[in-house]
Amino acid sequence: VNIKCLAPDTEICVQKIKNSTEFEPCFYSQKDVRCDEFGKGTMQETSTRQVRTVFDADSAPYSNMVMGEVINFPGKWSSYPPHDHPQPEIYHYRFDKPDGFGISIHEEDAFIIHQNDTMAISPHKVHSQVSAPGYAMYYIWLIPHLKEDRFGANSRNFREEHHWLLDPDAKIWPDNKK
């Protein structure tokens, strides 16, 4: 592959995994990327974020991975409610300001994350993260498919104690009266 950067501040992220399937190279433009707004209308908008899936098991069945990116609004949670899945996952973080930061939770451990940090999420480990108020967080993510279990829309296992958060009418305290 030859890549010509037309702007001096161009960045490229390479994510790869072994794949014995041969397929033609392809370019995913902005129009090819699915964009969803996760968390909208629940928990007083405390976990609203934009999730852009570049490709997944449905759109690229030849691939051994899923790849996407998340735009995390300031002070909001992501990968929320806390969940796990049998596949490992990698996050690479960026912030809209150089001093931006957030917290990534991996099981019972909390890690402060900064610009250019990368987090490896182990299989079957609960994870979520939050950006600090005032700082928008971006992360690109990769999930490899397992031979016996390709990651898909129903692959997230929400922990039983957090299932109530999935209810759009869940009441959280304090009740936000408008």
Image (cartoon, rainbow, N blue to C red):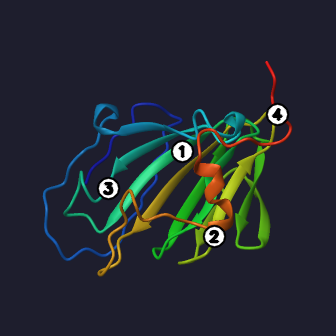
For marks 1 and 3 on the same chain, the one whose residue lies earlier in the sequence: 3
Nearer to us: label 2 or label 3: 2
List the residue tagged with mark 4.
Answer: 175
For marks 4 and 3 on the same chain, the one whose residue lies earlier in the sequence: 3
Q: Left or right: 89 with respect to 15?
A: right
Distance (Cα) linking label 1 and label 4: 28 Å
The amino acid marked with disc number 3 is: Asp
Q: Left or right: 168 with respect to 88?
A: right
Check disc 2: other Cα within 10 Å, few if <14, some if 14-19, many if 20+. Answer: many
Check disc 3: other Cα within 10 Å, few if <14, some if 14-19, many if 20+. Answer: many
- Quadrant where the N terminus sits is bottom left
Marks 1,3: beta carbons within 8 A: no
Label disc, if present, on residue 41 of the rendered structure: none
- Quadrant where the C terminus sits is top right
Residue 94, how many percent across, how many down?
64, 46
The amino acid marked with disc number 1 is: Val
The residue sitting at the right extreme is 174
Q: Is residue 101 above or below residue 162?
A: above
List the residue tagged with mark 3.
Answer: 56
List the residue tagged with mark 2.
Answer: 126
Q: Left or right: 44 with respect to 17?
A: right
Q: Quadrant of residue 109?
A: bottom right
Q: Quadrant of residue 129?
A: bottom right
Distance (Cα) linking label 1 and label 3: 15 Å
Marks 4,3: beta carbons within 8 A: no
Judge by depth and name the residue closer to the eye, 122 or 157: 157
Seen at 78% across and 64% down, the residue is: 111
